[in-house]
Image (cartoon, grey):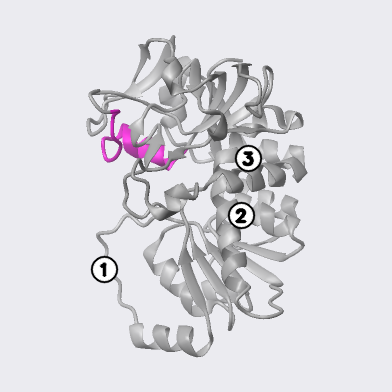
């Protein structure tokens, strides 16, 4: 069967390979891959900056944002032939640490977790794959091909889960206004969940016209560009989705008293910034503010993300998928274009 593979650490090594059928040891659920979403992590792996091949191997099958159709599954698996499913990315470490022992592998404490398509496990960008039933999440059939958005939706579902957990430390905490920084797929899906919660949602990005402002407006949220303080004013929740260092510190200063800042963007590092650390500390302490980092997702977050997508307007979700390319044209999918939001590789159509 065909699979998109890469030699981690080697730029320009990605290629479409013929590989063996997935071994039964990968799991009893056999899935036909329909589509794979492309994100910055994939681009980093292809560039040679990131990624680990499975033990004893030189190459890694790419793809962690998946959508597939079940070809076979045992009784009691929770999924059946014909179901649309998404494969969870992370697997718990073998020790396991206390978090992984409770299936909270997104909080793995010793770093020995593995991830399909990223770290020591083959990904989903092959014509078929096998998976353990507990890591296959059923998608509402009415979503069809839009189910490929579930993995990024799970990331922001987890972010909102963290916001709820921290905000609930305050009795009677009922946030009203939320700002999301960044109008990429993660930011737009974070805004979607905010709108579904009935909140006053504001999105900050650099683009002044075009698809990003249009998508935010179609969601019923307010779009901003330019001044961070003005956009953030009065925000009980800020979900930061860019990883831009200066912006991270600015939103920490601008959240409302008692507010929560959730950081989901990963900064590249290597850049020093001038920050009045004393003033920032004073504000956070005296105003009971909280800043939390959030990454990855466990099964509950995938299920929450699936609920959010199922409740969303299908025509709006369709606009998030800016391009669909066939597997043979995978290189085109990885080439970023100005109007891209979410690019999808179609494996079996």
- Whole-angstrom CA distance, mark 1 to mark 3, is 34 Å
The N terminus lies in quadrant: top left
Relative vertical location of residue 215 with respect to residue 328 in this rendering, above or below: below
Magenta stretch contains residue 42: yes
| Dot label at residue 190 | 2
Q: Is residue 186 visible?
A: yes
Q: Secondary structure at mark 1?
A: loop
- Of 31 and 156, the residue lying toward us: 31
Q: Find out whether the residues at labels 3 and 2 contact each other: C-beta distance under 8 Å.
A: no
Residue 282 is one of the magenta-drawn residues: no
Instruction: Give how far across and how far down residue 271 sits, in percent.
Output: 27, 63
Tell me how far mark 1 sits from mark 2, CA to CA.
Answer: 28 Å
Q: Which residues are magenta?
A: 39-54
Vertical order, 211 against 328 (above or below): below
Q: Position of residue 58 (x, y in %)?
A: 23, 23
Q: CA distance from mark 3 to mark 2?
A: 13 Å
Q: x, y (%) of residue 197?
A: 74, 60
Q: Nearer the viewer, residue 239 or 305?
A: 305
Crowding at mark 2 (Cα within 10 Å: few <14, some 14-19, many 20+): many
Q: Secondary structure at mark 2?
A: helix
Residue placed at 67% from the left, 21% from the top? Answer: 80
Compared to residue 59, the image places residue 272 above or below, namely below
Q: Position of residue 85 (x, y in %)?
A: 62, 28
Residue hosting label 1: 272
- Image point (43%, 10%), residue name: 21
Question: Label 3 belongs to which residue?
Answer: 320
Q: Is residue 84 left or right of residue 326?
A: right
Q: Does the CB distance between marks 1 and 3 fall below 8 Å?
A: no
Q: Is residue 243 left or right of residue 297?
A: left
């Amino acid at each position: 069967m065909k699979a998109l593979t890469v030699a981690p650490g080697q730029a320009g090594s990605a290629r479409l390979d013929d590989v063996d059928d997935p071994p039964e040891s990968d799991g009893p659920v056999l899935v036909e891959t329909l589509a794979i979403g492309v994100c910055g992590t994939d681009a980093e792996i292809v560039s040679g900056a990131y990624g680990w091949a499975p033990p004893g191997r030189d190459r890694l099958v790419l793809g962690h944002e998946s959508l597939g159709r079940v070809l076979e599954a045992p009784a009691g698996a929770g999924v059946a032939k014909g179901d649309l499913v998404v494969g969870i990315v992370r697997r718990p470490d073998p020790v396991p640490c206390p978090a992984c022992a409770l299936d909270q592998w997104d909080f793995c404490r010793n770093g020995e977790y593995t991830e399909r398509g990223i770290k020591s496990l083959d990904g989903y960008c092959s014509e078929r794959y096998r998976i353990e039933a507990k890591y296959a999440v059923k998608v509402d059939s009415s979503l069809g091909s839009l189910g490929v958005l579930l993995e990024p939706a799970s990331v922001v579902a987890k972010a909102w889960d963290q916001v709820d957990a921290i905000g609930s430390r305050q009795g009677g905490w009922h946030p009203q206004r939320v700002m999301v920084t960044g109008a990429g797929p993660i930011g737009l899906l974070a805004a979607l969940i905010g709108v579904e919660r009935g909140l006053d949602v504001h999105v900050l990005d650099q683009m002044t016209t075009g698809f990003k402002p249009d998508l935010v407006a179609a969601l019923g949220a307010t779009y901003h560009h330019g001044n961070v303080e003005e956009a953030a004013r009065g925000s009980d929740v800020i979900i930061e989705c860019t990883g831009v260092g200066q912006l991270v510190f600015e939103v920490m200063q601008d959240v409302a008293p008692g507010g929560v800042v959730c950081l989901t963007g990963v900064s590249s590092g290597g850049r020093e910034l001038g920050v009045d650390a004393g003033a920032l500390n004073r504000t956070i302490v005296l105003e009971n503010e909280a800043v939390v980092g959030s990454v990855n997702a466990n099964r509950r977050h995938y299920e929450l993300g699936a609920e959010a997508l199922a409740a969303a307007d299908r025509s709006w979700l369709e606009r998030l998928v800016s391009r669909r390319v066939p597997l043979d044209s995978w290189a085109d999918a990885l080439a970023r274009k100005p109007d891209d939001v979410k690019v999808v590789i179609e494996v079996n159509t």
